[in-house]
Image: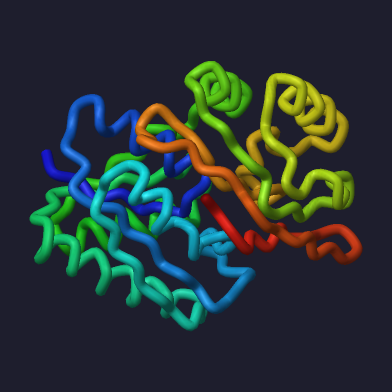
Amino acid sequence: MRLGVLFSGGKDSCYAIELASEEHEISCLITVNSDNKDSYMFHTPAIEWTKIQAESMGIPHLFGRTPGVEEDELKDLKILIKKAVSDYGIEGIVTGAIASVYQSTRIQKICADLNLWCFNPLWQSSQTELLLNLISGGYEICITAVAADYLDESWLGKHITVETISELLVLANKHKINPAGEGGEFETFVLNSPLFKKKLSITDSLRHFSRDSGRLEIRGVD
């Protein structure tokens, strides 16, 4: 089956591509850049660099924008998915959703409206196992945003490793949060995966941090 993947450049959407590609053809990646940095629907940190990731994977990439008005931004997503149907003949949509009912139900509705299959290969996965599988599977993952009072500026730009996972698990147990960042505690950008033909590296970046949240502004990727 020909599928399009909702692609943010983060660990979950990258892993969803790998899992879906085991039995299906990944025809294109679909990315929406929201002007609303606090979008409920879309991942926004480092989103402009998804083009470089798509090139490394050799997968066609559709990139659209939205003002990011809550609920209305779904109309812009639907337009881009329609283009994927027209340009690449996709028959379904892949998401990296793990537990977000807000996101999954809205994407499922768009798929139902367009008569597309909605495939969520990570749905209800163990978040600890997910992180460990990514590291053992050769993923290189950088943290690009934090939004929790126990994740300070030092986490921006940190790579997720076995040691980092151990730290996250301690914090998860202490603060009753999601170790994989599913609650928005942190966002990520993938620099390497089994599907990348070339490993990426961040050549220039700047940290922006205030109180209990911050972002890594990526200025260059090679």
Front position in the image: 176 or 35 = 35
Point 50% across, 27% down: residue: 125
Q: Position of residue 55 (x, y in %)?
A: 34, 50
Whether residue 74 is visible, yes or no, is: yes
Left or right: 44 in relation to 73: right
Q: Position of residue 65 (x, y in %)?
A: 41, 76
Q: Quadrant of residue 167?
A: top right
Would you place residue 109 above or below residue 27 in this image? Answer: below
Point 86% across, 58% down: residue: 212
Left or right: 77 in relation to 213: left
Would you place residue 136 above or below residue 32 in this image? Answer: above
Whether residue 11 is visible, yes or no, is: no
Which colouring convention does the figure follow? rainbow
Point 76% across, 49% down: residue: 156
> Which quarter of the figure is the N terminus placed in?
top left
Q: Position of residue 50 (x, y in %)?
A: 44, 56
Would you place residue 109 above or below residue 173 in this image? Answer: below
Point 11% across, 63% down: residue: 87
Front position in the image: 10 or 112 = 10
Q: How many marks?
A: 0
